[in-house]
Image (spheres, rainbow, N blue to C red):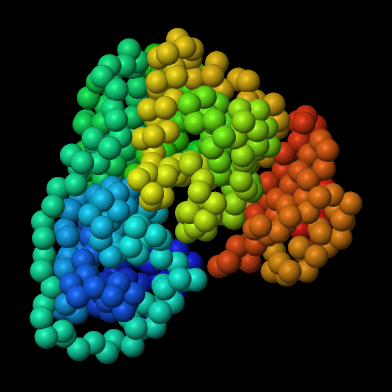
Amino acid sequence: MNSKIFKAYDIRGIYPEELNEEDAYNIGAAFALFIKKTSNKENPQVVVGRDNRKSSDSLFEELKRGIIEQGVDVINIGLSTTPTLYFAAAKYGCDGGINVTSSHNPKQYNGFKMVKEKALPLSETNGLKEIKEMALSDDFVKAEKEGRVIEKNINDEYILSNSIPDKFDLKVVIDTANSVAGVLVPYMFKNVNIVHIFSELDGDFPNHEPDPLKKENIEFLQNKVIEEKADLGIAFDGDGDRVCFVDEKGEVIPADLILALLSSIVLKDFSGSKVLYDIRSSNIIRETVEAMGGQAIPSRIGHSFIKETMRDKDIFFGAEYSGHYYLKYEGNYFEAPYFAVFSIMKEMQKTGNKLSQLIEPFRKYYHSGEMNFKAEKKEEVMERVKEKYKEGKASYIDGLRVDFNDWWFSLRASNTEPVLRLVVEAKNEELMKEKVEEIKDLIIF
C-alpha cells in the first residue's frame, strides 16, 4: 500500500496505481477495528456510500468485505453524495461512515471520506493516523462473527430534511458534471423550472472535470445561464458537498459574498446566532453578521477543523471560501449545500430581485482570490513577511493573517507541497494590486 494516499482529512490516490481493491479491503478492516475500539458497542454499525466513478463499485465491495469480516455491520446506502452520507451517519446513529469518492478530483482518482459517530470527520489528528498504521500493517484476523450488510435508501429522508418549498417562479440552470450530485437534482428541484446540464451519470466526466472552482469547468454553466435567460446557475462538485453560484449575467459569485448574503437572510430569523467563516474570506462577512446582531467566528481552513469549531462554539451555520456551506442540524454539523441554495432562491422569490442585485450591497471590498506561489523555504518566507508587516494586527489561526485599517492579507503554507497561498483584500482595487505585488516580491526573491 502506498502510504501517500493518506492525506490530512481523507484518503485519495490514482486508481489503480496508488489505490486499489486490496488497499480498500485493508482500509475497511482497519476502519472497522478503529470503530470497534472507539464505539464501545457490542454490534457497531457504519454507513457506506459511493460516488459514480468507474472504480467506485469494486472499491466499495472490497471496503465492505474488510469491514464486515471484522464484525462490524455495514449500512449500504448505494450511490450517495457526501452530504447524504453525513446525514445518514447522524440520522441512523451510526458509529461511523465512509463515502467512496475522490470529490472534485479528475476521473483517474478515487478515495475515501470518513466520519466517526455523529458524522464527526476523521482526520490525521483524531484517528486517521491510527487507521493508516493498521491498514499498512496488512495483518488482520477475521472476527468470529461476521457483520451484516443492511440495504437502505436514505434519499427520501434526506430530501424531506431540506424542507423544499412548494413553488418557485424561477428558471435555474444546474450543472452536476455527470457526477453523483445529479441523482438528487430531479427531486430537490421538482418545484422549479430547471435546465439540468451534464445530468447523465458518467464516471469519465466527459464534459468537464467535476471541480466548479476551475474557470474552464464553470464556463459551460455561465454560457448556459445567458443562453437560457435564466435567473440563476448552480454547479455542484463531484461528490455534491460544494456548490457554486452564477448570477443571471453569467458571473460567478464568490462563496464569501454568498455567505454575507446568507447571513443577512438567516439572521433576520435567528438573531444572535454565530456564523463561521474561514480566514480567506472578506471582511464583509464579519461586518454583515455583526450588523445583524450575530457573532462572526473566524476558523482554520478544512472541514474537520470547521466542524470541530462549530461544535465547540455552538455555531449555527458557516462557509468556506471553497464553496462548502455548513449547518447545525439536530445537534450535528455537516455540509448543507441545499440550505444555501434554497435560502437564496427564497430570497430572490420573496424580493423579486435578481441575484446580482442581492449581492451588490456586499461588493464593498476588492478581493484577490487565493493565489499559489512556489516557495522551497516556506518558513523563511513566512518570517520575512511577518517582520515586514509587524505593525499590523496579526493572527495565527491558520498560517499568518495581518489586518490593517484599509487592507489585510492571509499567507499560509501548504501541508503537502512547497507552496504558499496568498489572499489580499483592500478597500480599493489599486491598493489590493499594490499589496499583492509587494508581498509577491517577498515570496519570490
Corner quadrant of residue 416: bottom right
| Of the pair 314 and 149, the residue shown nearer to us | 314
The residue at 20%/50% (across/down) is 79
The residue at 40%/22% (across/down) is 345
Q: Residue furthest front?
A: 272
**Residue 301 placed where, x, y %?**
56, 54
The image shows residue 206, relative to residue 263, as above or below, that is below
The residue at 56%/44% (across/down) is 276
The image shows residue 173, relative to residue 118, as above or below, that is above
**Residue 95 placed where, x, y %?**
28, 65
Corner quadrant of residue 122: bottom left
Q: Is residue 409 left or right of residue 161?
A: right
The quadrant of the image that shows the N terminus is bottom left
Q: Residue furthest top?
A: 352
Q: Is residue 107 visible?
A: no
The quadrant of the image that shows the C terminus is bottom right
Q: Is residue 61 visible?
A: yes
**Residue 54 placed where, x, y %?**
22, 56
Q: Is residue 253 left or right of residue 42?
A: right
Q: Is residue 36 left or right of residue 401?
A: left
| Of the pair 396 and 118, the residue shown nearer to us | 118
| Of the pair 436 and 183, the residue shown nearer to us | 183
Corner quadrant of residue 200: top left
| Of the pair 256 and 5, the residue shown nearer to us | 256
How many tags in the picture? 0
The residue at 83%/38% (across/down) is 405
**Residue 331 placed where, x, y %?**
38, 49
Q: Is residue 71 left or right of residue 346?
A: left
